[in-house]
Amino acid sequence: MSFDKEALHIYDTTLRDGAQQEGLNLSVHDKLTIARHLDDLGVGFIEGGWPGANPKDTEFFALAKKELKLKNATFVAFGATRRPNVKAADDVLLGALRDSGAPAVTLVAKAYDRHVDLALKTSLDENLAMIRDSVTHLRQEGQRVFLDAEHFFDGYRANRAYALEVIRVAMEAGADVAALCDTNGGMLPDEIADVVHDVLGATSARLGIHCHNDTGCAVANSMAAVAAGATHVQGTLNGYGERTGNADLVTIIANLELKKKKDVLPQNALREAFRISHAVAEVTNISPSPRQPYAGVSAFAHKAGLHASAIKVDPSLYQHEDPESVGNDMRMLVSDMAGRASIELKSMELGVDLKGDRELIGRVVDRVKEMESRGFTFEAADASFELLLREEATGKRPSFFTINHWLTTTERGAKNSIITKAEVTVTAQGKEITCSGEGNGPVNAFDNALRDGLNQLYPELAALELTDYKVRILEGRLGTGAITRVLVETSDGKGEWNTVGVHENVIAASAMALEDALTFGLLRQGRKPE
């Protein structure tokens, strides 16, 4: 089947529903950037927000008219039906939808009689008239109209006849689709399927599905609705949304294309899913979930040695899909659970050829297990593991410098100011260098001092930046004398790498991780070790 965005609508509502997530605040520029990413993914419809309801969305729609050039998606404005006892042509918010420049509009309407009574404070008949008038008016103005039947499933349970009448009225007035909304997110897949099947039989409407994730079933509920006959699926990228979020469109799309063999995106667009999922996460400034299906960095990560042995023979034995189908990668995690196959596969991933040397691989396995028993972890420290591999393979650890001595001091000065200094002595290229630095803590001061001393010999270090620093206490029973694990993430602007250090002293542990970070960074720059 060739791609046809009308055959099964993929409708994204990240810019409105997703933006309601706690801690997620999108600027107008953010919304424009995300819209372009969504268009690159190839979704059929992008809901931009509610013009006229707030200044930000009004500004966004004004800019979108001039700046947003979509290749794949249709731009959609969101709004409500007219107010009670007001003509549609005179309703201010409907006017904003008319003037939005969006070729399509989604109207939210009450499908639950209790909401009509308590929230709208109007009659059931007037609510139906509001739906009919609003859809008819926008259709006459030349816009395509979708209906979001809010709280539909709760309304169906309370008053099936009225909920069905909402759908019938909307369709008779000219709506293309009636999306059944599980607004409170309380439904389960079998219940969704039964209701969708019944509504299809009773109304012959084109139905959509809009699910929230309060039962953890948003994706499953969306898939159940499609299986029951819905041909319009709403969701948000990465499952952003209020409370526990909305249905994750990345997972839904991958399920539909890979499991159900439905072509819902342009050809090969699904291979951009990982990249776009993470690009949008950068814009929202919300760390992506590593365990997100398909697009999480752990989605195709393997740790157990038994799994690795099977994957070495055939990756499909422990992977439900080829990670490349969504633009992701298989990763091998090195831990005390690792066996020979794990080490061999991981070394191949890192580009270190162990040449099938069973004795060498055995030494690496034993060393990893011994070091992890002391608190090291290599699951999240690939750079430190690669240095270990190189050391075992060549008999010598890659080295550009040796730290001979360090001293850190912290004092409270005038007006409660805190002053932290570090002094570090290193040997590099046959020279002993003593350097000093200040920072907002002993580790930062140590890092600044070390770089200051080495920059004159290795100017490449100026491009390196410490981007993350994590400390974990491993043996709480020892209190302030506990063993400390430090993980450091470093970037050179082209990529990131992680290193680890373990010691009873947090600064000593940090020094280990920083030494590995700078050493690995110089290797990336093409420097040859001393």
Image (tube, rainbow, N blue to C red):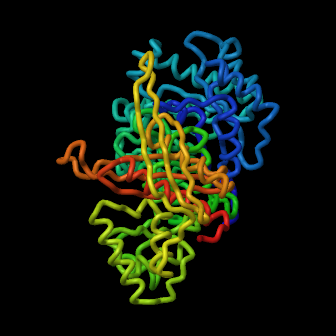
Q: Is residue 37 above or below residue 96?
A: below
The foreground one among 211 and 173 is 211
Name the spot of residue 62 as percent of width and height, x first.
76, 25
Quarter of the rendering containing residue 75: top right
Question: Is residue 262 visible in this depiction of the protein?
Answer: no
Image position of 357 (left or right of 528): left
* Residue at horizontal 45 percent and vertical 70 percent from the top: 332
Name the spot of residue 402 as percent of width and height, x first.
50, 62
Image position of 39 (left or right of 184): right
Name the spot of residue 159 as percent of width and height, x first.
37, 30
The foreground one among 243 and 424 is 424
Quarter of the rendering containing residue 529: bottom right
Image position of 392 (left or right of 480): right
Quick one: which residue is furthest to the right in this view?
A: 66
Image position of 94 (left or right of 347): right
How many numbered callouts? Answer: 0
* Residue at horizontal 49 percent and vertical 49 percent from the top: 424
Name the spot of residue 254 as percent of width and height, x first.
54, 59
* Residue at horizontal 55 percent and vertical 28 percent from the top: 108
Location of the C terminus by quadrant is bottom right
Q: Is residue 152 above or below residue 416?
A: below
Quick one: which residue is furthest to the left in this view?
A: 477
* Residue at horizontal 71 percent and vertical 15 percent from the top: 89
Location of the N terminus by quadrant is bottom right
Question: Is residue 330 visible in this depiction of the protein?
Answer: yes
The foreground one among 182 and 41 is 41
